[in-house]
Amino acid sequence: MDFFTPVVDDPFWFGQIAAANALSDIYAMGGEPKTAMNLVGFPLKEMELSVLREILRGGLEKMKEAGVVLVGGHSIEDSELKYGLAVTGFVHPQRVLTKGNLAVGDRLILTKPLGTGIVNTAVKAGLADGKTIDTVTQLMAALNRDAARIMREYPVHACTDITGFGFLGHLAEMLTGASAGLEIFSARVPILPEAVEFAGMGLVPGGARKNREFREGIVDFPASMDDVFKDVLFDPQTSGGLLICVAKEAADALLDRLRKEASRDADIIGEVAAEPRGRIVVR
């Protein structure tokens, strides 16, 4: 179950993004979403019902794209607009993917570029142009379906999707309870170029600051790395990509398939290391 307040002005695209975000949790666990229920909080006295109709239309189109059946839902009158889904999916019990189960030598693949939180902050400030808005909107609305389908054919040990805790925050979750560490190849992490520009202007969401305060104690950065890049790595994402942990010998083949069939931005961005245990080392 996942829902949130609008991240874009267009109600149709807000519906698309919220639906894609909710469906992603099923994909990240190796499953296939099958049914969904709408979750709505709507300020009836402040907004026209036409806004709600467009949100629900956007969500329904995204569900149809995913092959998911809408089976109902629940709505309440609320002071602030909210929309999302409760989703049910199927996966074989022996093929459920969790955030754990890392093995030393595994490679980490990220399927979508980072920076949507920062760009959305710039959009709210009126500093993003139309092309940038279209790019980030399409990115957030894109399903993780194809990436999930492809990864099921490879020896994937763990997976999660990148959302509110940011890239490094979700890596930290994967490390919980693991007798290993993570090494990140910063030059290979896909990032929206506009996000770096806006972060340099100070347009960093409060969530990124909170993520950094909470997790930077287990992260080792190069002395030469500036704070702008660190902010991007902690940036909270909306409907971000999959972070896939796959056996070393299959990583290149999986990456090639992902780039051809799911996301041209996908890249191998790190590996599971024996030492230092419980830490993330950014190179």
Image (cartoon, helix red, strand yellow):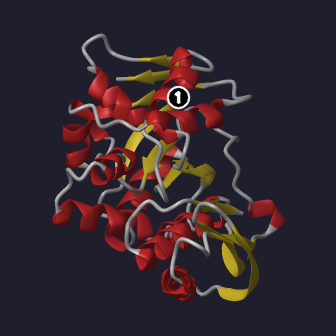
Residue 121 position within the rendered picture, expressed as x and y whole percent measured from the top left: 34, 47
Locate the N terminus and report the quarter of the image it occupies: bottom right
Horizontally, residue 137 falls left or right of residue 68, namely left
Horizontally, residue 118 falls left or right of residue 12, namely left
Residue found at the very far right of the displayed protein:
93
Residue found at the very far front of the displayed protein:
45
Q: How many marks?
A: 1
Task: Identify residue for label 1.
Answer: 210
Residue 159 in sight from this viewpoint: yes
Locate the C terminus and report the quarter of the image it occupies: top left
Horizontally, residue 75 falls left or right of residue 222, namely right
Mark 1 is surrounded, within 10 Å at the Cα level, by few (under 14), some (14 to 19) or many (20 or more) other residues, namely some
Residue 76 position within the rendered picture, expressed as x and y whole percent measured from the top left: 73, 72
Residue 152 in sight from this viewpoint: no
Q: Is residue 87 above or below residue 50?
A: above
Give the residue at x 75% y 80%.
73
Mark 1 residue element: helix
The residue lying toward the viewer, choosing from 37 and 162, is 37
Where residue 220 sits, quadrant-wise, is top left
Give the residue at x 83% y 64%.
93
Give the residue at x 42% y 70%.
142
Residue 278 position within the rendered picture, expressed as x and y whole percent measured from the top left: 62, 20
Residue 108 position within the rendered picture, expressed as x and y whole percent measured from the top left: 48, 43
Residue type, mark 1 in image: Lys
The residue lying toward the viewer, choosing from 187 and 137, is 137
The residue lying toward the viewer, choosing from 133 and 82, is 82
Residue found at the very far top of the displayed protein:
223
Q: Is residue 239 above or below residue 122?
A: below
Give the residue at x 66% y 61%.
2
